[in-house]
Amino acid sequence: MTSTNLQNQTIVIIGGSSGLGLATAHAAIKSKARVIIGGADNNKLQAALAELGEHATGRTLNVLDPTSIQQFFDAIPALDHLLITAAVIRPGRLLDAPIEALQANLDSRFWGSVHSLRAAAPRLASTGSITLTSGMVTQRPQVGKSLAAVAAGAVETLAHSLVREIAPRRINVINPGPMHTSLLTDMLGNNSARINELTNAQPLKRLGMPEDFADAALFLMHNPNINGEVLNLNGGSSWA
Ligand SMILES: NC(=O)c1ccc[n+]([C@@H]2O[C@H](COP(=O)([O-])OP(=O)(O)OC[C@H]3O[C@@H](n4cnc5c(N)ncnc54)[C@H](OP(=O)(O)O)[C@@H]3O)[C@@H](O)[C@H]2O)c1
């Protein structure tokens, strides 16, 4: 076997109700997979499900709440691949910000991933995979993002550390640079001058598109020899 066909496979996407996760859900359905999406906001989830059509189902969960993560997976008898894009980003300077806000970065991205892996594992196919999401803040420190960076770095270390423990299932991470989603445009105040400035600062003079992420995520799911990798999806910004 050289690669895993995604046809008729079940792909669970926590964070599948918008942005990078939703684009991956669309791409997975095009590859004839079934998708199960999760997100916190039920209205958003229902809108995404309406958009995705009959090959998608979903339910709400809160990645900050281990009980809701367990309940989410308890409703899924079996899955082939798990992608987690959901995370809460709470910027704040280490010395000034409320500690609860700083902890939310780790509670969602890192501990949310840990709880999800533990809940998903008994149902995950032996040929299956897990894909986590980090971010370029691991490579470009920003004031007020130290704990966001630590959380992103932690999921990368988690993936490296688990390759033997979860084998024959695989685990990888996508580390995106700036991607054109509402998360980014909202952060830039939906200001087109700031969006253009960021675009032009990229080596390829383009922001990553959600479809670029979807393509990378499906590649990590179907290639049976990619394991423990962090895939930098940033148009070369790591080296520019
Ligand atoms: N876009 C970028 O430029 C960029 C760059 C680097 C890294 N990333 C990372 O990539 C991931 C996806 O980003 P995106 O641009 O696709 O963001 P997005 O459009 O805001 O999507 C985030 C998804 O996660 C869900 N989510 C958020 N908080 C949740 C919670 N507490 N419980 C359950 N679900 C929750 C959202 O659903 P609800 O809204 O309903 O909660 C949504 O489905 C994030 O981890 C982000 O940090 C993004």
Image: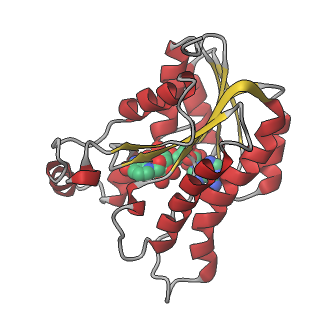
Depth check: give the residue in front, 29 or 152. 152
Depth check: give the residue in front, 209 or 52. 209
Quadrant holding the N terminus: top right
Depth check: give the residue in front, 40 or 27. 27
Dividing the picture into quadrants, the one containing residue 74 is top right
Residue 113: x and y in percent read 66, 51
Quadrant holding the C terminus: bottom left
Q: Is residue 157 visible?
A: yes
Task: Please give the name of the residue rendered at 33% of the width and 36% of the height, measured from the top-left corner.
Answer: 209
Which residue appears farthest toward the bottom when viewing the image?
95
Whether residue 77 is situated above or below residue 32 in the rendered picture: below
Marks counted in the figure total: 0
Residue 26: x and y in percent read 50, 23
Whether residue 36 is situated above or below residue 116 in the rendered picture: above
Left or right of residue 135, residue 179 in this image = left
Left or right of residue 185, residue 195 in this image = left
Left or right of residue 19, residue 171 in this image = right
Way the structure is coloured: secondary structure
Task: Please give the name of the residue rendered at 79% of the width and 46% of the height, measured from the top-left corner.
Answer: 118
Whether residue 233 is situated above or below residue 187 in the rendered picture: above
Task: Please give the name of the residue rendered at 49% of the width and 88% of the height, measured from the top-left corner.
Answer: 96
Task: Please give the name of the residue rendered at 65% of the width and 42% of the height, measured from the top-left corner.
Answer: 163
Left or right of residue 166, residue 55 in this image = left
Depth check: give the residue in front, 191 or 19. 19
Q: Is residue 72 visible?
A: no
Residue 186: x and y in percent read 37, 55
Residue 128: x and y in percent read 68, 27
